[in-house]
Image (tube, rainbow, N blue to C red):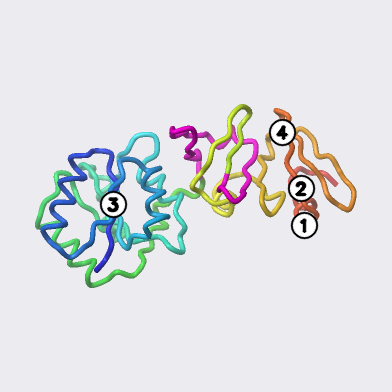
């Protein structure tokens, strides 16, 4: 049986859809999320086969969330939307599954039948943003949305991936690889990325190593492997 996750900021919409899916009995509902950040966490942890994803959510939309997912392991997406002629036309043109609010049982049944016949991964690349404008983070029992231009560097350790700005540090669900691919952050070390616009100076050390000093005084290690590329990107010979 396919595992399904529902992501929608409207609790009544989530509960209504879950009830309809339970009545159908063809999917196992493994969770709900009321925002994209919680949804990202549950996708990474629960590995659903199908995600019913609301498009219109505050701060981070459903489309924004798609850019935060690993394309190699992305579940099948069924979009949920209030009536929007242009959005629906885009879904139709690309043969994406979508449900209109309020959800019609016949339309839902059609979507579920389609899922049963074809669970293979979709190509939703036409609507996935090519870059991330903000990084969702958690810390101190709160959710923090950090604009990418404020990030000085990102680093990973056993506790996860940490994003550092001038005055705060928070933990992200995104991997360093994903941040490297979707943001202007540059790889400077196996465990670090740095924002080139936040570099104050590069201090050259012995044995081909270096350190970056950021505008607010943080130091970031630079390994021999990435020093040349970092210097070339900054136009340094």
Q: Is residue 237 left or right of residue 126?
A: right
Identify the residue under disc 2: 222
Q: Which residues are magenta?
A: 132-161
Q: Would you say the residues marked 2 and 4 are in contact, meaning their CB atoms lie under 8 Å apart?
A: no
Q: Looking at the image, is mark 3 or mark 4 nearer the viewer?
A: 3
> Does the magenta segment cover residue 142?
yes
From the image, give the main secondary structure of the stretch colored magenta.
Answer: strand
Q: Looking at the image, is mark 1 or mark 3 nearer the viewer?
A: 3
Q: Which residue is depicted at the point 18% across and 48% down?
A: 100
Q: Would you say the residues marked 3 and 2 are in contact, meaning their CB atoms lie under 8 Å apart?
A: no
Q: Earlier in the sequence, mark 3 or mark 4?
A: 3
User: Where does residue 136 sit, x and y in percent of width and height?
Assistant: 47, 40
Q: Residues within 10 Å of mark 1 (few under 14, many from 20)?
A: some
Mark 3 element type: strand
Identify the residue under disc 1: 225
Q: Which residue is depicted at the point 37% across and 57% down?
A: 46
Identify the residue under disc 4: 218
Mark 4 element type: loop
Quadrant of the frame with the N terminus: bottom left
Q: Looking at the image, is mark 4 or mark 1 nearer the viewer?
A: 4
Q: CA distance from mark 1 to mark 3?
A: 42 Å
Q: CA distance from mark 3 to mark 2?
A: 41 Å
């Amino acid at each position: 049986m396919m595992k399904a996750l529902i992501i929608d900021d409207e609790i009544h919409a989530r509960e209504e859809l879950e009830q309809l899916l339970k009545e159908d009995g063809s999917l196992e509902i493994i969770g709900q999320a009321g925002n994209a950040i919680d949804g990202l966490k549950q996708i990474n942890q629960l590995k659903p086969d199908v995600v019913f994803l609301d498009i219109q959510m505050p701060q981070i939309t459903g489309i924004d969330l798609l850019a935060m997912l690993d394309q190699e392991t992305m579940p099948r997406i069924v979009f949920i939307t209030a009536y929007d002629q242009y959005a629906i036309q885009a879904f139709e043109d690309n043969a994406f599954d979508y449900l209109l609010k309020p959800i019609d049982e016949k339309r839902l049944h059609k979507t579920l039948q389609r899922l049963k016949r074809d669970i293979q991964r979709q190509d939703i690349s036409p609507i996935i943003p090519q870059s991330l404008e903000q990084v969702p983070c958690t810390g101190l029992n709160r959710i923090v949305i950090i604009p990418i231009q404020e990030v000085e560097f990102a680093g990973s350790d056993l506790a996860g991936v940490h994003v550092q700005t001038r005055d705060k540090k928070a933990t992200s669900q995104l991997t360093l690889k994903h941040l490297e691919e979707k943001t202007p952050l540059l790889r400077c070390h196996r465990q670090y990325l740095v924002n080139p616009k936040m570099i104050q100076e590069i201090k050259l050390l012995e044995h081909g190593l270096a350190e970056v000093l950021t505008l607010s005084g943080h130091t970031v290690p630079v390994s021999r492997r990435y020093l040349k590329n970092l210097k070339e990107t900054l136009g340094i010979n």
